[in-house]
Amino acid sequence: MGLDVSYQLRVNPIACTAHGLCAELLPEVIELDPWGYPILLSPAVPDDVMDHARRAVDACPTLALLMEEVVDRLCGRAGYADAGGHGPGRVSPDSA
């Protein structure tokens, strides 16, 4: 049985200091509010902008933009990790 994996973005509002770099690198998913803070149009990352999303996450000067891996919620397995597969809640195919 294969796992259904998708990615979503999350902004840590405490760490964010409104540099706006994320919106410049990923305008398909991120807009800025009047004060320059990011607003996610959708947390889901479309496949066609995945490279841009990873670049935006890596370029965030305060590490406030995070990409989480969402794994197969339909079968009762769910977790998240950063784009490299690290982090709390990581679900591996072997765990159940």
Image: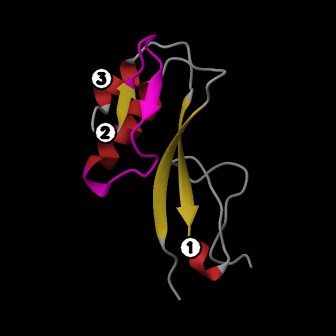
Q: Position of residue 67 (x, y in %)?
A: 51, 44
Number of the label disc, if any, that sits on residue 52: 2
Q: Quadrant of residue 71?
A: bottom right
Residue drawn at the location 63% of the way across and 50% of the way down: 86
Furthest-front residue in this view: 34
Q: Principal SS element in the magenta part?
A: loop
**Residue 42 counted in the magenta span:** yes
- Structural distance between the alpha carbons of marks 1 and 2: 24 Å
Sequence-wise first label, 3 or 2? 3
| Label 2 neighbour load within 10 Å: few <14, some 14-19, many 20+ | some
Going by the picture, which residue comes out furthest to the bottom? 1
As shown in the figure, which amino acid type bears the numbered disc 1? Answer: Asp
Vertical placement of residue 9 versus 25, above or below: below
Residue for badge 1: 72
* Range of residues picked out in magenta: 32-48
Of callouts 1 and 2, the N-terminal one: 2
Mark 3: amino acid: Glu
81 falls in the magenta region: no
- Relative to 77, is 3 on the left or the right? left
Residue 6 place in picture, x, y as percent = 46, 61
First-in-chain label (3 vs 1): 3
How crowded pointer 1 is (Cα within 10 Å; few <14, some 14-19, many 20+) is rated as some
Per the image, label 1 sits on a secondary structure element best described as: loop
Q: Is 15 displayed left or right of 19 in the figure? A: right
In this rendering, position of residue 78 left or right of residue 71: right
